[in-house]
Image (cartoon, rainbow, N blue to C red):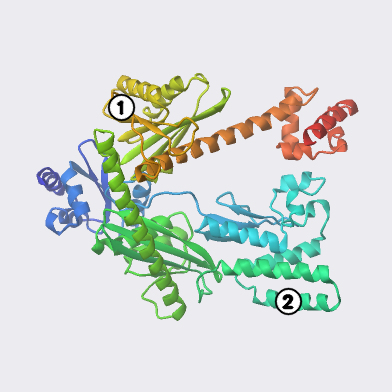
Amino acid sequence: MYENGLNALTKALANIPDLPGVYEMLDAKGAILYVGKAKRLNRRVFSYTRVSALCLRLQRMVSKIHSVQYTVTHNELEALLLELHKIQKKKPPFNILLKEGRALAYLTLSAHPFPALTAKRTNFIEGEKIFGPFLNRDLLETTKTYIYKAFQLRSCSDRVFSARKRPCLQYYIKSCSAPCVQKITVSEYKKAVDGALQILKGKSDALENSLLQDMKSASAQHLYEKAALLRDRLRWIHQAKTTQSVTHIPKEDVDVVAGVFAHGVTCLQLCCFRQGMNYGGQHFFFPGTTEPEVSEVLSEFIRQFYFHMKPPKEFVVSHVCSPDVVETLQHLHQVTVKITHLPQEEAQLNILAHANLNARHALQQYVQAKEEVDVLVQRMKTTFELNTVPRCIEVYDNSHVQGHHSCAGMVSFEDGLWQPKNSKILFMGKTVGNDHALLKEMLIRRFSRALPHPDLLLVDGGIGHVSSAYATLCDLNLQHIDVLGIAKGPQHRDGQETFYRKNQPPVQFSDTDPLLHFLQRLRNKAHQYVIQAYRRTHRRSMVRSIFEQLPGIGPVRQQKLRCIFQDTEALKNASLEDLKAIPGFSKKLAEKVYNFLNTLDS
């Protein structure tokens, strides 16, 4: 089993020097299996010849080795950084990899005289106050909503702010004080911003006491409307504080990483604390690992997660970290980093225990869900007589209105879990209105991409769609991939679906069958994914069409208007004087455009 791999290692060892550097294990096709670093390359590569001492993951890797490449570096630190860059770029399958998700979100207060409170992932502007990262999107949205309610800060962009002539809906639902139309003074708005800053910094006790005294004073003076406003503000501030579910929150910047292991899966729980605020938690799963590897998984996680993101001053961890983690982070970010294992302080012990508990619950749910999916996919293979157990399923759907703005999508699932990176949207134009031709074009485009092939295609449609998909796969020499059609019932009600396979009788399930619910969930996720993309496209086309509908406006003037107003909201808020002031606009043309925009508004 290991003979070819051991021969490749022995052959490579004849040339590998005993110097610091990075090595790459390659398979027969030249694909990178594993990237590692070493202070002494020869000794490290030799260690892989002792197969029995390796974990199962690395034993499987040795069985696939065909050749070894290496790069000599000046020192161990350079090797560390080169290894990390290669792992980030190549994603070798036998390295411990952190799956990439979306960039973390932050709350920002702009440097404008009337600052806007907004959520951002990237494109930060100099002078902004930045709070985060929020690991939990729900926590970010909840905190943002409560601050809007308590302090009525604006959420609009500076461009929309400067173009407004009347308050927006947020003003009328008491989530904004409408500084755009001078409904609040600069000093009053600054006071509200200061209050929001105290909340975001976790220092709201003094603010609450002050508001409570002001409320009592207003009530004593029979200023009941003002007292009610202050009461509501106190309530929203209290609600914002209750999102902080952890007691004894540390006042310094600390990230907590707790690791647990069960059933061949390591789960890490990350909790983030900044300036006395809890910015939420997030869990990460690493299947195919062993219990002795938890420390290595935790170390690799910290190195990869903070590769681009600035680390906190201190980490509190459940397992001993590799010493090179601190060295790597300090070199990458030019900051001092401390890692504490088994802390002595009560606050740190509390948050580590909290993270550990969350990791155990998350892992328990993950394992239970995986076991349920294992049973369901085995049932699918038997019920539909599939060629293989459908671990990887791709669902295909399309959306259009009367043949316009056609949008087709493929959504990928691995063991029942959505894989955003492998899900794709394809916008079609040539085959609009013909579902079968659209499906054919979509499959041709999908299998021209360098993505792993699925075990099963789930197509939203009946036997005709299944036949079209299968014929296309045969043309592409991919007839080994199974195709399953899911057709809606007569009234398009859930539970009435019929499933089709080529050359097999149709199958229906009881509306309480877990397998039916599983397949419905996959189809509904694909439909949601495609509909959202369709709406984005339709929205963009609507923006274009309003500029194109303006009476008396040709392409040159359209472009001029776009440069000035940039979106339909700003254009609709333009006054007659604004339009008259545009170079090349006569009074008559400005009135014509203004009247047209007012007609749209009404």
Q: Is residue 1 left or right of residue 339?
A: left
- 354 vs 483, nearest the viewer: 483
Could you say where residue 304 lies in the image, as x and y percent from the top left?
A: 39, 55
Could you say where residue 483 lies in the image, as x and y percent from the top left?
A: 33, 29
Please identify the quarter of the rendering in which residue 144 is found: bottom right
Q: Amino acid at mark 2?
A: Leu
> According to the image, label 1 marks what residue?
505
Q: Residue at x 36, y 28 (%)?
A: 447
User: Can residue 591 be seen at all in this image of the molecule?
Assistant: yes
Q: Compared to 85, does 200 lie above or below?
A: below
User: Can residue 71 be seen at all in this image of the molecule?
Assistant: no
> According to the image, label 2 marks what residue?
212
Q: Residue at x 47, y 30 (%)?
A: 490
Q: Is residue 258 left or right of residue 433?
A: left
Q: Amino acid at mark 1?
A: Pro
Q: CB atoms at circles 2 and 1 under 8 Å apart? A: no
Please identify the quarter of the rendering in which residue 536 is found: top right
How far apart in space, not on screen, are marks 2 and 1 (Cα)? 71 Å
What is the crowding at mark 2: few (fewer than 14 residues within 10 Å), some, or many (at least 20)? Answer: some
Q: Compared to 14, does 130 lie above or below?
A: below
Quarter containing the N terminus = top left
Could you say where residue 408 lies in the image, as x and y percent from the top left?
A: 48, 29
Secondary structure beneath disc 2?
helix
What is the crowding at mark 1: few (fewer than 14 residues within 10 Å), some, or many (at least 20)? Answer: few
Q: How many marks overall?
A: 2
Q: Earlier in the sequence, mark 2 or mark 1?
A: 2
Q: Residue at x 47, y 77 (%)?
A: 347
Q: Residue at x 48, y 36 (%)?
A: 493
Could you say where residue 510 lies in the image, as x and y percent from the top left?
A: 37, 40
Q: Is residue 75 left or right of residue 273?
A: left
Please identify the quarter of the rendering in which residue 128 is found: bottom right
